[in-house]
Image (cartoon, rainbow, N blue to C red):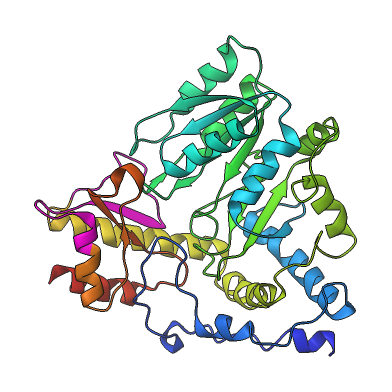
Amino acid sequence: MSPASLRPASPRLDPASREEIRYFHPGPSYVLEDVRSAMTRPVVAHRSGEFMALYRSLADRLPAVLRTSGEVYLATGSATLMMESAVISTVDRRILCLTNGAFSERWLEICRALGKEATPLAVPWGEAIDPDRVRQMVRDSPGGPFDAVTVVHCETSTGVLNPVAEIARAVREESAALVLVDAVSSLGGAAVETEAWGLDLVVGGVHKALAMPPGLVLVTFSERLVRAAERLPHRGYYTDLLRYRDKHRSGGTITTPAVSLVYALDRQLDRVLAEGMEPRWRRHLALRQRTLEWAQARGLALAPRSHPSPTVTCLRSPAGRCGSAMVERAAARGFVLGAGYGAWKQDTFRIGHMGEVQPADLNRLLRALEE
C-alpha cells in the first residue's frame, strides 16, 4: 500500500451535502459519515513507511488547530490520560487546581490520587474562575510556590467557558507555575490560543468540537514544561510527556496507536482546516447566540451565571420537569440531548451545538423542543 492510498480525496465541504444532524449530545459529538467511512480502510503497521508518512502529514497540520508554532503530539486514550500525564511529568509537590464543575474537580482528584499536595481554588458550579482570585492565590500562597496550575477551559458539566487567557496572564505575572489547560470541549469550537496566551500545556479532545470518534488525544506543551519535566526522574512510561516528544520527532507514537482513528482524524482535519479556525469559532458563537435567544424568548433560564460556552449550552429545566424528562421528550422526536451532569443532573439539560452542527440542524432541534 502506498502512502498516497492513506490520503483519500478531500471531503466535500458544502454544508448542503452533509447528512442531517439530530444528535446534540455534549460529547461525543456527531461524526459525519465520510469520517466514519475513513476508519474502514485497511490497517497498516504503525512503524511502516505508509503510516509514518500519514503521521508526518498530521504533524504538519495539527499546530494550526492548537494555534502554536510548537509540536502537537498524538496519544491513544482519553483526555484523562494526558491530564494525569501532565501532573506526573511536571509536578514535584504542590499544584493549584481551579475548580468550578465536575471535570475541573476530576483534575483535583487526579492530583490527590498521585499523592501531590493539591490545593483547590473552588467557585460554585455555574460561575467562571476569577483571574484576580487566581492572581492572589499564586502570589500569597502560605505553603510556598506552586509547581503548576490546572484549569478547564470549557467546563462541560455546566456550560461555562473560563477566561483562560486572563487566568494564564495572572499566573505568569505572579509566579513561575506552569499553566495546564484542559481544552477538551473547547478546541475546535472556541478560541484556544496556545502560544499567544502563554499556555504551558493544552490537552485537546477530538470527540467534541472537532467531531471525531473518541479515542485520540492531542497535546502540546512549552519549553518551560520540558525543563520542569527534565528535573523529575520518575515520569512513568505511558505517562511520560517527554517520551511522546521524542517518539514524535522520530516520526510516530510511543506505542501502537488506534490506526483506524488516525485515518478518521486525517479526514476530519482536512474539513476543519478548510473551514478555518476563526470561521469555525464564529459559527459556534452564532450557534450559542441562537440557542440563548431561543431559551430567553421561552422563559428558560441559562444555568451558568456568566461566560456561556460556544460549544454546549446548559439550561435549567422548565418548572415541574427534570432534565431527564426533557431528554426523553426530545428522544421521542428523534433528537439526542444531554442530561444534566453530576450535581446538576436533575435540574438541567444540555444542548451540545458543537462540531459539524449547522444553523439548520439547530433550528430543527429548537422547533422540536417547542413542542
Range of the magenta residues?
Answer: 301-326
- Toward the viewer: 56 or 332? 332
Residue extending farthest top: 142
Q: Quadrant of residue 321?
A: bottom left
Residue at 72 percent across and 74 percent down: it is 259
Tell me where residue 195 sits by quadrant.
top right
Is-magenta flag for residue 310?
yes
Figure label count: 0
Relative image position of residue 303 (x, y in whole percent): 26, 45
Which residue occupies the foreground of this view, 97 or 72?
97
| Left/right of residue 81 with respect to residue 224 in the rendered view | left
Instruction: Name which residue lies at 82% across and 73% down.
Output: 46
Residue 200 seen anywhere in this rendered image of the structure: no
Expressed as whole percent of the image width and height from the top left, the position of residue 134 reads 51, 24
The front one of 221 and 229 is 229
| Residue displayed at 77% across by 35% down | 224
Question: At which x and y percent is residue 14?
Answer: 48, 85
The quadrant of the picture occupied by the N terminus is bottom right
| Magenta segment main secondary structure | loop
Q: Is residue 222 left or right of residue 156?
A: right
Residue occupying image coordinates x 14% and y 69%: 370
Depicted 138 relative to depicted 286: above or below: above
Q: Is residue 305 visible?
A: yes
Name the quarter where the C terminus is drawn: bottom left
| 61 falls in the magenta region | no
In the image, taking residue 363 as reference, residue 222 lies left or right, namely right
Q: Is residue 175 above or below residue 306?
A: above
Residue 104's x, y, as percent? 49, 39
